Amino acid sequence: MIGEHLSTSSHWKRAYLDNPETRVSWYQRSPDKSLEMIRSLDLSKHARIIDVGAGASRLVDHLLADGYQSITLLDIADEPLALVRDRLGEAAAKVQFVVSDIADFAPAGPIDLWHDRAVFHFLITDDERGQYLRTLRDSVAPGGHVLIATFGPEGPDRCSGLPAMRYGPDELAETLGSDFELRDTAEEYHVTPGGAQQQFLYCLFARPAR
Ligand SMILES: C[S@@+](CC[C@H](N)C(=O)[O-])C[C@H]1O[C@@H](n2cnc3c(N)ncnc32)[C@H](O)[C@@H]1O
């Protein structure tokens, strides 16, 4: 399991059971930066998209509204995914929900777009990052894309009671390795429901087609 020492499924379950999802520090009313970068790719509506550590993010609502037909939401905790199922109502039938540690996940087929906001930065050890990156490399198709949003160099070093890494674009590119080419970056100052500002770095990578 990734982050066995701290980032356990029980930790995350508790975060969603103890707080309304609009009060957790990572809550976004609208995931504008992710949407802007995803829309810039002009993907086919059949593109296989996964949001890893999706939580109760509203990204899926917008992707469905944009017409995407193959969306998977993965999270280590079922609680936030249940909130999404309830929120989407009938439209939930168009989405695959997977409760799994990302380290243990094997997709049914290659992924065209991997999205991760605020999950990778919780991986503190080489071993944790290695497991995540193995899943990433095994999952993303040649020609596919990876959009990862982490805390930036001026972001917090703890979140949700857990230690967190901070990345600049070069560091994140180096961590992902030579299988992925950095294509675009963006910075965002996320305002938490409690009013704190957190610097986020968004990096869009392409996996070169073979
Ligand atoms: C800070 S929240 C971000 C949620 C969502 N991406 C967003 O932007 O609103 C981190 C999410 O990752 C999930 N998570 C943490 N570790 C995970 C792991 N190893 N595998 C899958 N999901 C994980 C948590 O349950 C939580 O929903």
Image: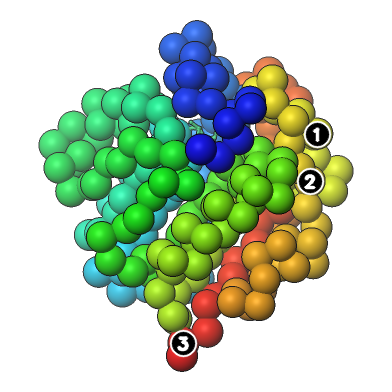
Q: Which mark is residue 209?
A: 3
Q: Residues within 10 Å of mark 2 (few under 14, many from 20)?
A: many
Q: Residue at x 31, y 74 (%)?
A: 44
What type is the residue that disc 3 sits on? Ala
Q: Secondary structure at mark 3?
A: loop
Q: Position of residue 159 (x, y in %)?
A: 70, 27
Residues tagged 2 and 1 counted as in contact (Cβ below 8 A): yes
Q: Residue at x 25, y 60 (%)?
A: 108
What residue does disc 2 label? Answer: 166
Q: Residue at x 53, y 26 (%)?
A: 8
Q: Secondary structure at mark 2?
A: loop
Q: Nearer the viewer, residue 4 or 98?
A: 4
Q: Residues within 10 Å of mark 1 (few under 14, many from 20)?
A: some
Q: Tell me: 58 left or right of 71.
A: right
Q: Position of residue 161 (x, y in %)?
A: 69, 20
Asked if disc 1 is less than 8 Å from ligand 1, the answer is: no
Q: Tell me: 62 left or right of 35.
A: left
Q: Which of pointers 1 and 3 lies earlier in the amino acid sequence?
A: 1
Q: Residue at x 38, y 69 (%)?
A: 112
Q: CA distance from mark 2 to mark 1?
A: 7 Å
Asked if disc 3 is less than 8 Å from ligand 1, the answer is: no
Q: CA distance from mark 1 to mark 3?
A: 36 Å
Residue 57 seen in this snapshot: no
Residue 131 seen in this snapshot: yes
What residue does disc 1 label? Answer: 157
Q: Nearer the viewer, residue 63 or 117?
A: 117
